[in-house]
Image: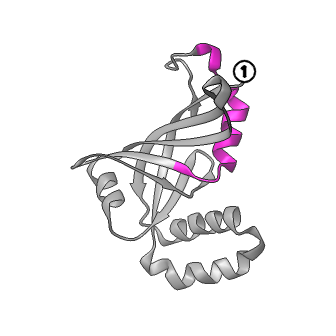
Amino acid sequence: MRYDNCTVRRQDRLLEEERAREILQVGEYGFLAMASVEGGYGVPINYAISGDTIYLHCAPEGRKLQAVANDNRVTFCVVGEKRLIPEQFTTMYESVVASGSARIVEDVDERRQALRLIVEKYASQHVEEGLKAIERSLHRTAVVAIKVHTLTGKSKQQ
C-alpha cells in the first residue's frame, strides 16, 4: 500500500501517513464505492484490515458482488474525527480514501480468517461465540478482499 497524496488538491490539508493508516485501521465503518452495470454504486459497510488488504463480508449474492465481478476497481473511504462548526459554516474532519482492486474470496480458510478479523474488531469480548457463529454461517457468507494500492489522507483542523 503506497501512501500518495500528490493528487489531493488542497495540499495544505494533507494528513500525516501514520494518522491516515490509523484511521483506516480503527474506523467504525467505511464507504465502498464501485462501478456497476447500472452506474455507480456505493454502500457503507463494516470491515477489517490485514496488511494492505481490507476485508468485507456480505450475502453470497447481490449488487455488491455483481459490481466487483464486473469491474474490480474500487475506492473505500473512512472518516476519522469530525466536528461540525455551524457558526463558521464548516466542519473539522479527517478522512482517508483507499483505492485498490477487489476480489471475491473463494478460499474457505481465507474467508474464515477475514470473518475472524471482523469479529475481533467489532466484538472483541465475544470472540469465542463469534467463531461459532462464523462456522454456522460460513456457507452463506461471502467475503470481499480489497488489495489497497494507494491511500490518501486529508484533514481540516482549523
Predominant SS along the magenta part: helix
- Work out whether 8 lies above or below 111: above
From the viewer's perspective, tell me whether residue 77 is left or right of residue 16. left
Residue holding disc 1: 158
Q: Quadrant of residue 61?
A: bottom left
Name the one closer to the observer, 118 or 11.
Answer: 11
Q: Position of residue 129 (x, y in %)?
A: 69, 82
Q: Position of residue 62 (x, y in %)?
A: 32, 65
Taking the spot 61% from the left edge, 26% from the top edge, the residue there is: 90
Q: Which residues are magenta?
A: 11-30
Q: Quadrant of the C terminus?
A: top right
152 magenta-colored: no
Taking the spot 57% from the left edge, 78% from the top edge, the residue there is: 134
Q: Position of residue 77 (x, y in %)?
A: 53, 41
From the viewer's perspective, tell me whether residue 104 is left or right of residue 52. left
20 magenta-colored: yes
Q: Quadrant of the N terminus?
A: top right
Helix, strand or loop for disc 1: loop
